[in-house]
Image (tube, helix red, strand yellow):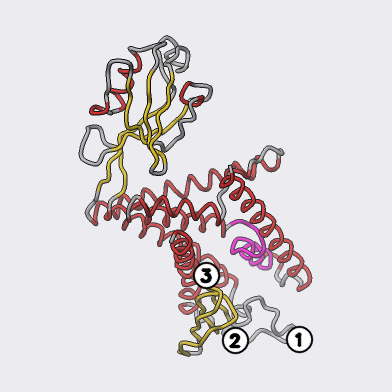
Amino acid sequence: MSVFLLIAMLVVLIVVHELGHFTAAKLLNVRVEEFGVGYPPRAFLIAVYKGTQYTINWLPFGGFVRLLEEDGMERPESRPRGGSFAAAPKWKQAIILFAGVIANAIFGWTLFTAGLMSGMPAEVTTLQAGARLLVTQVVPGSPAEHASIHVGDEITGVVDKNTSMAATLTPTAVVDFVRERGGKALAISYMRKGIEETIALEPAHAILPDMPSRPAIGMGLALVAEQQLPFGSAFVEGATHTGYALRSVLSGMWMLVRDAFIGTADIRILVGPVGLVSVVGDASAHGLGEFFALAALISVNLVIINLLPIPVLDGGRLVFVALESLRGKKISRTAAQILNTLGFASIIILMIAVTYNDIARLIS
């Protein structure tokens, strides 16, 4: 089921991206020869309307838009035909290329809005029905790290030899409970992926840099409950979520590229298709709101990834358009083919490496 949900999610997100290109091309009078769901070979033709073929294809992993003379190489011996992408002014080409990521950004906003209306986890300050105490941070070198507590674990109980606080699990209550029991053994119960575990640890000093004298176990906590918002509030809050997600993904991408140049990049933090199966399964198990939120985050990721200046991506093609506009002539056919091949090869190599890491994580 998780595999099916992931495929369905990716198909929808990619078709939305291609729908952005399609809509912009139609509005700018650039001829769209085919709008396909899935990738060739073609399964069947749905219809032909205003010169555009609408098709279903056998490989169910996305979709595509085929514009007339999209790469400008179909008729190298003659001038581009009227209504073709190659004959369109550079500003029209740029809008059409950029429209795909705009569609993903808007769709991410829509999905965040739907998730907030369906019900998404939000931090609360008081105990209420359905509230969960989640680990938000683990201090390096702390008792919590040595006990293998992870960010995202749900704390279900904190017990010493005489006292249990299962009924009063709030961040403040746990901090106060731990602070009074430095050096004493505690049993911490937590839930991870539907399995409850209990570990023993002792609060220690010098865990919190700003409060070295206070006993602590080294984990940040937040009380979280599912909250549903009305449409107006969800629409506004969805915009905030979308903006924050764009900044976070862009920041993470920049740090990865920066670290790659200095030789310290760690691609193990990336998640590929295999890893996404587990992530989608976890999100769907926690409700429709979290599933929508995950789909929104992936849609935002597609915005940033597609804007990377790699020739086969929209960002690389936008660079081509900019260079051709500055030079006043097209990039040579040979140079474009070489750069596209290198870009495609780099993406394949990265996907193989990320998939290897996904499988390694599953095995470990």
In the figure, 35 relative to 322: above or below? below
Give the residue type that dot 3 points to.
Gly
The numbered mark, 1 or 3, whose residue comes first in the sequence reads 3
The numbered mark, 2 or 1, whose residue comes first in the sequence reads 1
Give the residue type that dot 1 points to.
Glu
What kind of element bears circle 2?
loop
> Between marks 1 and 3, how big is the CA–CA gap?
33 Å
Magenta stretch, overall SS: helix
Q: Position of residue 243 (x, y in %)?
A: 42, 49
Image mark for residue 160: none
The residue depicted at 40 percent of the width and 62 percent of the height is 107
Q: Position of residue 151 (x, y in %)?
A: 44, 35
> Between marks 3 and 2, how big is the CA–CA gap?
29 Å
In the figure, 78 relative to 134: above or below? below
Crowd around label 1: few <14 · some 14–19 · many ≥20 (10 Å): few
- Regarding residue 256, the answer to whether it shows in the image is yes
Q: In the image, is 181 to the left or to the right of 246?
A: left
* Residue 316: in magenta span: yes
The residue depicted at 56 percent of the width and 60 percent of the height is 306
Identify the image quadrant of the N terminus.
Answer: bottom left
Q: Is 35 or 335 nearer to us in this picture? A: 35
Residue carrying label 3? 62
- Regarding residue 103, the answer to whether it shows in the image is no
Identify the image quadrant of the C terminus.
Answer: top right
The residue depicted at 64 percent of the width and 62 percent of the height is 316
Q: Nearer the viewer, mark 1 or mark 3?
A: 3
What kind of element bears circle 3?
strand
Residue carrying label 1? 77
In the figure, 191 relative to 15: above or below? above
Q: Nearer the viewer, mark 3 or mark 2?
A: 3
The residue depicted at 46 percent of the width and 34 percent of the height is 150
